[in-house]
Image (cartoon, rainbow, N blue to C red):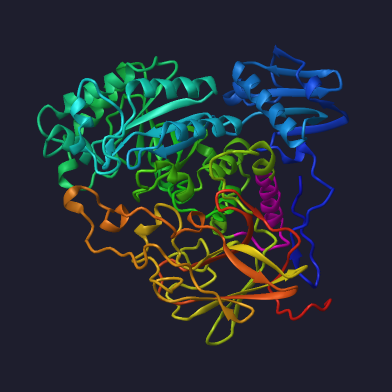
């Protein structure tokens, strides 16, 4: 297993593949609480000799004691100690990962481990876009590998009511769908997924999102508003039908939605939401609701899913952290995954610890992904996100650094070293634990890269040694990037020098459009026109020669309609209904670029007229679905010429 080594010298930084591979113990993900290496090692045959016994795990917090374990590997075999089958499951998952990381050989060791959070979840929106059963199962498989335990299944939204109802089959009639017409999960398929998840230690939390996000519901029932008499009874009966599909001990949570009631047809009697919550409670389940959302009367058994930071301190209910700025991954690039997972403390309200349950990362994709619904995995960073965020949720973060969202810390700092270490572990999972994984895993190392950012007109240098694969300059003026002050009307140059050991043609991910993920067209007025890198003009050059953009298959896409508020889709325009084809780097093959032996100069110029200014340039091996970083290259943010040894 090759690893990233930061080699700092006058010639820059490089990815180095060497024989000094990290120990499997150092590459575990999530990182265990304690891992002590001991003399010797065990092969696969020895590791098959597992003795599991019930016992307490020293120092494990009571809230997560059932998931704690001790794993000891010796030359004679493996011993697991846990107080609950969940702890034993996670110990066996750790052992299996060690075998993969060590190519069948495990260092003798003692691992003592438990999670920081009780709930460690992933949500997929199957209401807006149906996802094939194989795709849902793949999500569950990867969640299980990385000790995630809650699958939040968003089954209904504007575009479809994706769960079969035998009581109200009209919800599945073609007129009720806006996308993937007639595609939904039968009750038998739903039961299959619940059982499949349960076998892997994962609880399915289904969501019927009401009374907002209910266009498909109203189209199916042919009603005008959610407050029509009898609607409250229909929702009651649908919730009872849902609860009948799995016992309460297997499916103890039902998500009711309740958020974003914004247009007249979605408003209903406020008491109905409390009624539906009591229906869920009456079926022996806890109700989960988005917060902020519609108010529920006291006395109900409710868990808040906080999608705003501020809401956490405005409630008395137990809560799950799901802040849209930190955990929504619908518009992350392959390079945002590292910073978003490394530096967000999802437990920073420790004074509210009695109410805090855990966190969920959510894959929203407002855009239509088309009829090939597995396209979702190319549009969005689903599997890298599960792997990376599992480390955050299991291990926790000591401090919260919002300034590092979508931007890595400065090289040479302790925070940057943390990012390098996490990046190395994610890459090891990609190459070892998930070797042969058939779904896209677009993750590439970036910490060796170096950029200089400067104003074109003045030449003023704004930043040096920026280590990013995607560099966001301002990201809509937020503090997530802050290399450039908001509304600065100046062309910005990004420059890097790359040293190649030989003349060679490599693949490159290049993008200047600021368009990433199946959520980002909400932010962009237009996709690139033919012959352009972005809709407002940008240039990319290698060694002074302009690189031409791809032959876009859908050049110049832009909205021709205003948001369709009268149809209760507050964010939607016609642009979102055109599936992406090649607009993202993960949707098209890497572009061939020719490097000469020695130093090569890359220069990207971004115009000021962009709502989300950023650029990607990364040399990759392999395909866009399964890329690898190119090793043996050196990077510098300082000007280099020729092939001399500086």
Query: Which image quadrant for residue 51?
Result: top right
Quarter placement of the C terminus? bottom right
Would residue 409 be counted in the magenta stretch? yes
- Seen at 26% across and 56% down, the residue is 573
Left or right of 544 on screen, residue 57: right
Residue 120 placement (x, y as % from top left): 53, 33
Q: Nearer the viewer, residue 143 or 435?
A: 435
- Considering depth in this image, is 22 or 181 the residue closer to the camera? 181
358 and 605: which is toward the camera? 605
Residue displayed at 81% across by 18% down: 77
Q: Please tell me how many numbered marks the rendered image carries.
A: 0
Q: In the picture, which quadrant includes the N terminus?
A: top right
Taking 144 as reference, is 577 above or below it? below
Q: Is residue 346 visible?
A: no
Rendered view: 253 above or below 84: below
Q: Main secondary structure of the magenta part?
A: helix
Tell me if residue 90 can be seen: yes
Picture quadrant of residue 293: top left
Q: Is 491 included in the stretch rendered in magenta?
A: no
Q: Where is residue 37? Give x, y as percent.
A: 83, 33
Q: Position of residue 260 (x, y in %)?
A: 28, 45
Tell me which residue sits at (76%, 69%) in the image: 502
Q: Residue lying farthest right?
A: 39
Q: Which residues are magenta?
A: 408-427
Q: Position of residue 21 (x, y in %)?
A: 81, 45
């Amino acid at each position: 297993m090759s690893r990233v080594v930061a080699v700092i010298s006058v010639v820059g930084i490089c990815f180095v593949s060497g024989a000094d591979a990290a120990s499997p113990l150092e590459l575990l993900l999530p990182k265990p609480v304690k891992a002590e290496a001991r003399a010797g090692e065990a092969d696969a045959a020895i590791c098959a000799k597992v003795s599991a016994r019930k016992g307490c795990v020293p120092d494990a917090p009571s809230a997560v004691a059932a998931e704690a374990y001790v794993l000891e590997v010796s030359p004679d075999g493996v011993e697991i100690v846990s107080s609950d089958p969940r702890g034993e499951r996670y110990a066996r998952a750790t052992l299996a990962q060690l075998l993969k990381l060590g190519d069948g050989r495990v260092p003798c060791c003692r691992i003592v481990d438990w999670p920081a959070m009780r709930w460690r979840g992933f949500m997929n929106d199957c209401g807006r876009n149906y996802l094939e059963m194989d795709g849902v199962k793949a999500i569950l498989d990867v969640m299980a590998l990385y000790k995630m335990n809650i699958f939040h299944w968003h089954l209904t939204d504007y575009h479809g009511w994706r769960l079969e109802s035998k009581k109200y089959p009209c919800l599945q009639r073609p007129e009720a769908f806006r996308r993937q017409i007639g595609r939904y999960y039968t009750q038998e398929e739903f039961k299959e997924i619940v059982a499949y998840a349960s076998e892997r230690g994962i609880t399915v939390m289904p969501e019927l999102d009401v009374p907002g996000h209910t266009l498909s519901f109203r189209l199916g029932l042919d009603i005008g508003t959610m407050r029509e008499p009898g609607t409250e009874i229909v929702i009651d009966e649908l919730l009872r039908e849902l609860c009948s599909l799995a016992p309460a001990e297997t499916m103890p949570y039902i998500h009711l939605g309740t958020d974003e009631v914004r247009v007249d047809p979605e408003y209903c009697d406020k008491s109905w939401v409390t009624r539906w919550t009591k229906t869920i409670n009456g079926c022996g389940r806890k109700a989960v609701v988005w917060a902020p959302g519609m108010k529920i009367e006291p006395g109900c058994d409710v868990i808040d899913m906080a999608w705003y930071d501020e809401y956490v301190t405005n409630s008395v209910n137990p809560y799950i952290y799901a802040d849209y700025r930190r955990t929504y991954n619908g518009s992350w690039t392959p390079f945002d995954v590292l910073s978003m997972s490394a530096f967000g403390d999802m437990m920073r309200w420790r004074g509210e610890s009695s109410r805090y349950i855990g966190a969920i990362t959510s894959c929203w994709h407002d855009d239509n992904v088309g009829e090939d619904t597995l396209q979702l995995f190319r549009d969005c960073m689903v599997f890298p996100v599960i792997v990376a965020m599992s480390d955050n949720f299991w291990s926790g973060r000591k401090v919260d650094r919002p300034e590092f969202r979508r931007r890595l810390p400065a090289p040479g700092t302790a925070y940057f070293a943390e990012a390098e270490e996490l990046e190395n572990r994610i890459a090891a999972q990609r190459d070892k634990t998930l070797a042969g994984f058939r779904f896209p895993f677009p993750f590439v190392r970036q910490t060796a890269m170096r950029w200089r950012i400067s104003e074109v007109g003045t030449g003023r240098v704004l930043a040096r040694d920026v280590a990013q694969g995607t560099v966001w300059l301002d990201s809509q003026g937020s503090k997530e990037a802050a290399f450039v002050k908001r509304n600065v009307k100046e062309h910005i140059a990004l420059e890097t020098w790359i040293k190649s050991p030989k003349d060679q043609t490599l693949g490159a991910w290049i993008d200047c459009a600021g368009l990433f993920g199946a959520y980002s067209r909400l932010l962009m007025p237009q996709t690139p026109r033919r012959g352009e890198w972005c809709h407002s003009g940008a240039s990319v050059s290698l060694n002074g020669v302009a690189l031409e953009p791809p032959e876009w298959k859908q050049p110049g896409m832009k909205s021709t309609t205003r948001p369709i508020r009268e149809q209760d889709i507050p964010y939607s325009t016609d642009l979102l209904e055109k599936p992406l084809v090649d607009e993202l780097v993960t949707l098209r093959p890497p572009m061939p670029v020719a490097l000469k032996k020695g130093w090569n100069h890359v220069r990207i110029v971004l115009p000021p007229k962009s709502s989300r200014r950023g650029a990607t340039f990364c040399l990759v091996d392999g395909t866009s679905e399964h890329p690898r970083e190119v090793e043996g290259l050196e990077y510098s943010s300082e000007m280099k010429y020729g092939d001399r040894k500086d």
